[in-house]
Amino acid sequence: MIPARYGATRFPGKLMQDLGGKPVIVRTYEATKDTRLFDEVYVVTDSELIFKEIELNGGKAIMSIKEHDCGTDRIAEAVEDMDVDIVVNVQGDEPFTSKSGLKQVLSVFDGPDADKIDLASLMTEIYDWKEISDPNSVKVIVDKENFALYFSRSPIPYPRDKNAAVQYYKHKGIYAFRKKALLDFYRLPMRPMEAVEKIECIRFLEYGKNIKMAISNIQSIEIDTPDDLIRANKVLKDGNNIVVNNQYRNFPMVPKVVYGRGSFDQLSSILAPQRKDKAPFIYLVDDVFKDNADIIDRMNLRFNDKLIFVSAEEEPKTEQVDTIVKNIKGEFTYSPSGIIGVGGGSVLDLSKAVSIMLTNKGSAADYQGWDLVNTKSIYHVGVPTISGTGAEVSRTTVLMGPEKKLGINSDFTTFDQVLLDPDLTASVPKDQWFYTGMDCFIHCVESLNGTFLNEFSKSYGEKAYDLCKEIFLSDNLSEVESRGKLMMASWHGGMSIAYSQVGVAHAMSYGLSYVLGIKHGIGNCIVFDHLEEYYPEGVRIFKEMKDYHNIKLPQGICNNLTEYQMNTMIDIALSLVPLWENALGDDWKSKITRDKLQDLYLKM
Ligand code: NAD
Ligand code: ZN
């Protein structure tokens, strides 16, 4: 809902001013609609002129019945008789409204504490004391789960101790309301704090509502004065459509990495400075190393450090993460100094998830998705013992949950330290070496052929692609060389998708894995073998590699599926929206159908 009052005090009629050939309000309407985040978009106005202009441009508008003092009342009246769940207000004078801010404010309703939330809003980090003390900028303070404690035009908190670090936040006027919260606001009278601060949303706090805040550092242009309009017109003319600071995502990378044969011996000295008094390091180690005294000795466990062997027989599950976390919390009074994962993609993912869940409440299943983790994980280190998944560099940990197979994708997932010792991969069996290596090759093909590709991803993807061809198709590499190269191919392949996405093979392989328990590496190979239509060149080379190494893939694995199983598999595959968007573009839904997926699955 876009509330639009014609007579703004500071700049009358501003919503009807020309912005690059269209009135400001039409620009705002179109930008909001273009986000495709909403079932319906309406302008709610007191002005015939605005109403007609929106309708003339093919949009939907509603005339307010009563007079309203504020935008919130205006949209509350408009939705009173609508059957809606969540209502988002977009400011009429923000023609460059960006998708990511709106997406963020909506995404809080996907979080584990969604039931508690009455409404959500955004805040931006501010640093400049001038802005912090400016009464025109509304500051907000939050609790540790980012629920708003108070809004004020004063600097809050007051910095009595100038040396204590504190982050100041400025409130941004975008809200997502549950319908009930919005109607309550409309019906309940203003109380003294709202009246004295002149900040609408204080009313929610005064009546005990929970406002969840999301951080968004996007800078938008608000049209408040004629000067703003001149600036906005210039922005449009320069083709620089949206002036946002984070139009490009700010990705975490692994901050520390050591590479080299035998570098595993360095592990304990790398960990030493991270050790906190009495707090143990927890080692999660693939159980293939259970009887490998050499590897265990070299880890050099101290004090109350704990070694937990985990099986990679099955892929990691949310339930398994929850159990490990519960046991660690039960056994130790202090939260661990760190989690060290030693193993393949399965163990690395498990370690990342455990380190997140030691500091975040609830079950790992609550965080499967994009950017749902609120609190920084504990220090965690990854030591791969098989190469290909890129799990050592990625910002995801792929987990099988009760309802879905999906990663916990967050800035806190990425390892704090990685140790790459190619010698650790010497014992990997041949077939497994191929399947996991092909995960890397497929990451490259999917990234390089995807619509999300940029030079950053391409530079990593091309390198890894070439390394894979050398490793899997030439016969002039020694085993030692080949291991070192595959370890780096995995790293680059992972970096290539870090800033982009995988595609068709991964989406379909997740379906196989969910329904049939087929593991990631081999599942990808089974799927990719039939994807000539999407990746002709990649699939041709893959088949060549497969023949070269005499790998026999299982056949007919979907022949005996029930209709229910087939449908579940298709549902899981289709639920991975970003993967399809990357593979086939924005209009992917018109390019891939359930029948098409079923045909493909039946071929495998
Ligand atoms: P894996 O960890 O499942 O291990 C495969 C097999 O190899 C296991 O039996 C394991 O015990 C064995 N193994 C591992 N190291 C060995 C060694 N040095 N010697 C002998 N045997 C060894 O395999 P993977 O392919 O590395 O990982 C697959 C998992 O990674 C899947 O769960 C998948 O979802 C995940 N994955 C994660 C990401 C990410 O970015 N987080 C990316 C791709 C895949
Ligand atoms: Zn993969």
Image (cartoon, rainbow, N blue to C red):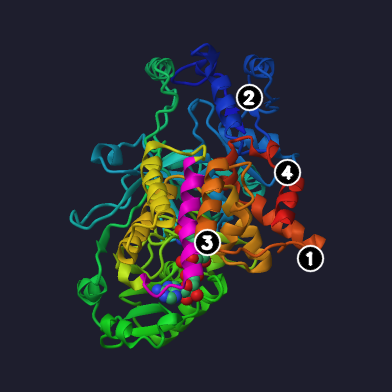
Q: Which mark is residue 367?
A: 3
Give the residue at mark 1.
560
Tell me, yes or no, whether the highlighted magenta stretch contains residue 433: yes
Give the residue at mark 4.
593
**Front-most of residues 500 and 333:** 500
Q: Is residue 559 above or below residue 600?
A: below
Q: Mark 3 and mark 1 in contact (Cβ < 8 Å)?
A: no
* Residue 324: image location, x then y, percent: 48, 79
- Kindly report the distance in space between the C-alpha atoms of the residues bearing marks 1 and 2: 58 Å
Q: Secondary structure at mark 2?
A: strand
Which of the two labelled residues, at mark 4 and mark 2, occupies the earlier sequence position? 2
Camera-nearest label, 1 or 2:
1
Residue plotted at (66% across, 19% down):
51
Q: Which residues are magenta?
A: 425-448
- Kindly report the distance in space between the C-alpha atoms of the residues bearing marks 4 and 3: 29 Å
**Front-most of residues 352 and 165:** 352
Left or right: 145 in relation to 540: left
* Residue 544: image location, x then y, percent: 53, 52
- Kindly report the distance in space between the C-alpha atoms of the residues bearing marks 1 and 3: 33 Å
Residue plotted at (30% across, 75% down):
337
- Kindly report the distance in space between the C-alpha atoms of the residues bearing marks 4 and 1: 21 Å
Near mark 2 (Cα within 10 A), the count class, few <14, some 14-19 or many ≥20, is: many
Which of the two labelled residues, at mark 1 and mark 2, occupies the earlier sequence position? 2
Q: Which mark is residue 45?
A: 2
